[in-house]
Amino acid sequence: MAAYLIADTLLTDPDAYEEYKRKARPLAEKHGGEYVVRGGDMVIEESELWSPSRLVVVRFPSVEQARAFYESPEYQQALGISKRSARRTVVIVEGV
């Protein structure tokens, strides 16, 4: 069953974050990930519980593959760049 990695990102250093993006995408693709949303315009219809800043959605073939990507040593190195240049909430959710 498909899984989606969803990240809400507030950039604190957009220039540095560009390096993270260049490194993260090929790693996600290596684990079967396909970017379906990458920071596009949003229309927020309701925000009682959450008001997102910048959304990224990556579809993976399974939760296991999404977690293998996120937990891989290569991604953990790239993640350090993200943590220095943005504040984020990341979830992996099983989909259809």
Image: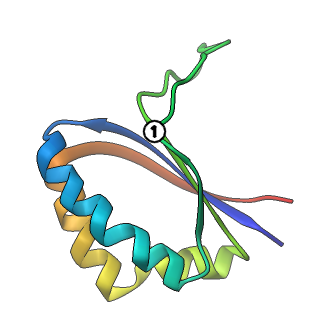
Quadrant of the rendering where the C terminus is positioned = bottom right
Colour pattern? rainbow
* Placement of 96 over or under 23, stated as above or below: above
Image point 16% across, 36% down: which residue? 12
* Placement of 90 over or under 61, stated as above or below: above
Tag 1 residue: 39
* Placement of 67 over or under 96, stated as above or below: below
- Helix, strand or loop for disc 1: loop
Q: Is residue 50 left or right of residue 76?
A: right
Image point 43% across, 34% down: which residue? 54
Q: Nearer the viewer, residue 25 or 81?
A: 25
Residue type highlighted by circle 1: Gly
* Placement of 41 over or under 88, stated as above or below: above
* Residue 91 percent location from the top left of the image: 55, 54
Q: Is residue 50 left or right of residue 61?
A: left
Q: Is residue 19 left or right of residue 94?
A: left
* Residue 85 percent location from the top left of the image: 16, 48
Image point 65% across, 81% down: which residue? 64
* Residue 94 percent location from the top left of the image: 75, 62
Q: Picture quarter containing residue 13?
A: top left
Q: Nearer the viewer, residue 24 or 76?
A: 24
* Residue 55 percent location from the top left of the image: 49, 39
* Mark 1: few/some/many CA within 10 Å (<14, 14-19, 20+): few
Q: Nearer the viewer, residue 25 or 88?
A: 25
